[in-house]
Amino acid sequence: MPRLQDDMQDALRRLGGANGPGYVIAALYKFVELPDHRDLQPRLQTVCDTHDVHGTLLLAHEGINGTICARPAGMAAVLDWIEADGRFADLSLKFSVAEDQAFLRMKVRLKTEIVTMGQPGINPAHATGTYVEPADWNSLVDDPDVMVIDTRNSYETAIGSFAGAVDPQTDSFREFPAWAQDLADAEDRPKKLAMFCTGGIRCEKASALMQQMGFDEVYHLKGGILKYLEEVPAEDSRWQGECFVFDGRVAVDHDLRPGGYDMCHACRMPLSEEDKEHPAFSPGISCHHCIARHDADSRSRFAERQKQITLARQRGEDHLGRSPRKQAGDES
């Protein structure tokens, strides 16, 4: 059996889905030079469409990134196709399971960067921080000399993070370099950094940036939070809360099952059941996070969009209109 298929079967056994889950979800990436990424795009799109795979994959000169969802057989077929290209050896791959399809459609998109930081001189394929396996993460973050940094955005950190992690409070990954520069310029700058993100891709790029800024000991969690939750038992975990994901599940718990959050489709903030009881919450129109930011015209547009979504659901159709939520894999 090809390696990626074998990895999938191992993950399904750990997640209790080896006897036939409805769907398997794969978050994947690799920094690798792809000068032919434009030629790969239509071929990869066709393979995914043929095997009824949904989600988003990003292709750029610097590599591949994305999240896809399919029945196990369809997922195996796409992973075989990817693995046949030797450049994707050691692809970073994390799995979870779901009862329903997590995405509405499949899109293979061409991008300038597979994760957008806006620092063209950073190339993790050539230099990045030191990988830390999930099994070794606890001992690293328990070191009092280590600053643990969550490289995700504020709408993600709001519902869960590692205990004691520093939150840069960014709204976009493009804001991270400015925060990092302030840390590098500080008189009491830390000597050791441990960085993490959802699937490993952002902290890999961020750790390369930190090295360029002169930090000598820079570590990052291999496979990100998702791999940690997959491999580290809950009783040994340093993770607190749920993990935001870029698909219809909104968040996953420590068992990588859909969590307890919904989403405000006006501002994409995750919402708890308590949040949805707030007077400012109106499905598809506003929540307490964003009601003050939208004028009457915006709320009117949101209301019309929500009306069309509701009508589509009543007809048993998917509504594919523009949504403020980012596509899977586009973890800005």
Image: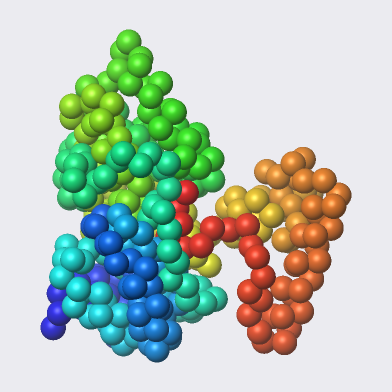
Question: Is 266 situated left or right of 77 in this image?
Answer: right
| Residue 62 % position (x, y) | 30, 55
Q: Is residue 327 left or right of residue 303?
A: left
User: Is residue 146 in view?
Assistant: no
The residue positioned 44% from the left and 28% from the top of the image is 178
Picture quadrant of residue 214:
top left
Q: In the rendered view, would you say 278 is above or below 25?
A: above
Pick whichever, 117 or 53, lies toward us: 117
Q: Quadrant of residue 322?
A: bottom right
Q: Quadrant of residue 189?
A: top left
| Image vertical order of residue 43 relative to residue 64, above or below | below
Closer to the camera, 256 or 297? 297
Q: Is residue 223 left or right of residue 308?
A: left
Q: Position of residue 119 (x, y in %)?
A: 38, 39
- In the rendered image, the quadrant that contains the N terminus is bottom left
Residue at 31% in and 87% down: 73
**What is the residue that sits farthest to the top in this orientation?**
187
Q: Position of residue 290 (x, y in %)?
A: 71, 45
What residue sits 32% from the left and 57% below the top? 61
Q: Is residue 316 above or below residue 131?
A: below
Q: Is residue 299 visible?
A: yes
135 or 224: which is nearer to us? 224
Badge count: 0
Identify the coloring: rainbow
**Residue 184 percent coordinates (x, y):** 33, 21
